Amino acid sequence: MPDKTKVLVIDDDPAICVSVKAILEASGYEVFTALSGQEGLELFRQVKPDLVLCDMMMEDIDAGAKVAGVIKKERPELPVFLLSTIGEATARTIGLDELGFNGVFQKPVNFDLLLSVLEKHRPKN
Amino acid sequence: MSKNLADLFRTAPDLEDFFAEVKSLGGNFSLTTEDLMALGQAYFERYPEKFVQRNLDEVRLGYQLTRFCLLEKALNDFPEEVKEFFRQAFDKPEAASGLLETFRLSTYGDKLQEYFVQLQASLFEIKTTVDELPKGMIKERFLGGLSTLHNVVYLLKILISRNC
């Protein structure tokens, strides 16, 4: 049986982490969660995820961008998506790709969309 | 009678007392955008926002606060046993599957789908109110709290459909 796709979820709200983990696990993913940017980077190096979902405002207002920047430096090919409440209009103006994000999911997250995007980013064996 | 959540928050010595007060209202409180703004202001008076080295415990209290109030409002019309099932499922999504099984065998188990649809409609209405808040940190906390509720609704939808 092939290994499950590993998703790393980084969000300062434990309730978000637990609920996203429950949904993704019910959909066949292996999920790791971190409650700060710093913890997220430690876990990123430890578990080598296939995809990262990351909040923006955590220990600092731009912690998510710092995380994405470090990840992209170490593994430029890894898809990193922002989970945020910033709104569609702001998302279009802040230059997400320059910050290291492949895209954004607005909270509350549309999981039909998120799961279809995850499916497209599943590593091909 | 309608109670003002902001006043309740200001007079409650801690969050647990506030939650007990809100729970005792059984969802009978006003939840307009003005009420959300007032509650958000009361929260930020007690826990002022910082933009570097934020106090994550206080930020999390904000999400917990908004989540609790929004859920209590959404459960407004449900029997107490049904409210308790949903409170537990939202509090421990990782245990939702087992909680659903237990609830199916309870007095209200055969009306699960009906209650679930009603809950989704209530949360949709509440989201409309949250969406009307002006951009800023108060809206951010309410969107954060609402997000978890939406996530758990999605999870329950998956679990319910698998057992139909």
Image (cartoon, coloured by chain):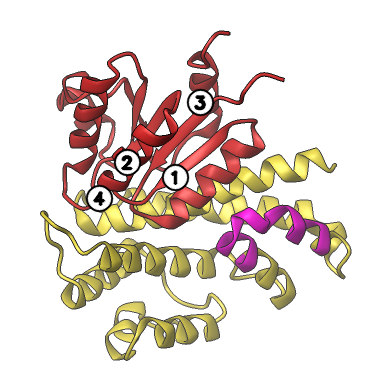
Q: Which of marks 3 and 2 is nearer the N terminus?
A: 2
Please name which of the two marks, 4 or 2, marks the residue nearer to the observer.
2
Chain B rendered in what hue? yellow
Q: Earlier in the sequence, mark 3 or mark 4?
A: 4
Q: Which residues, given as a range, are shown in magenta?
A: B87-102
**Mark 4 Cα-neighbour bin, 10 Å: few <14, some 14–19, many ≥20:** many
Q: Quadrant of residue B2?
A: bottom left
* Element class at badge 1: strand
Residue that mark 3 sits on: A113
Q: Which chain does the red colour mark? A: A
Main SS class of the magenta portion in the image: helix
Q: Are marks 4 and 1 on the same chain?
A: yes
Q: Where is residue B6 in the image (x, y as percent from the top left)?
A: 30, 78
B59 relative to A44 in the view: left or right: left
B83 relative to B29 in the view: left or right: right
Residue that mark 2 sits on: A42
Please tell me which residue is depicted at 45% across the width and 23% down the height of the picture.
A50
* Element class at badge 3: helix
Residue that mark 4 sits on: A58
Q: Where is residue A17 in the image (x, y as percent from the top left)?
A: 46, 49
Question: Does the magenta segment cover residue B99?
Answer: yes
* Front position in the image: A4 or A28: A4
The vertical placement of B97 against B7, above or below, is: above
Q: Which of marks 4 and 1 is nearer the N terminus?
A: 1
Residue that mark 1 sits on: A33
Tag 2 subunit: A
Marks 2 and 1, Cα distance to the nearest angstrom? Answer: 11 Å
Tag 3 subunit: A
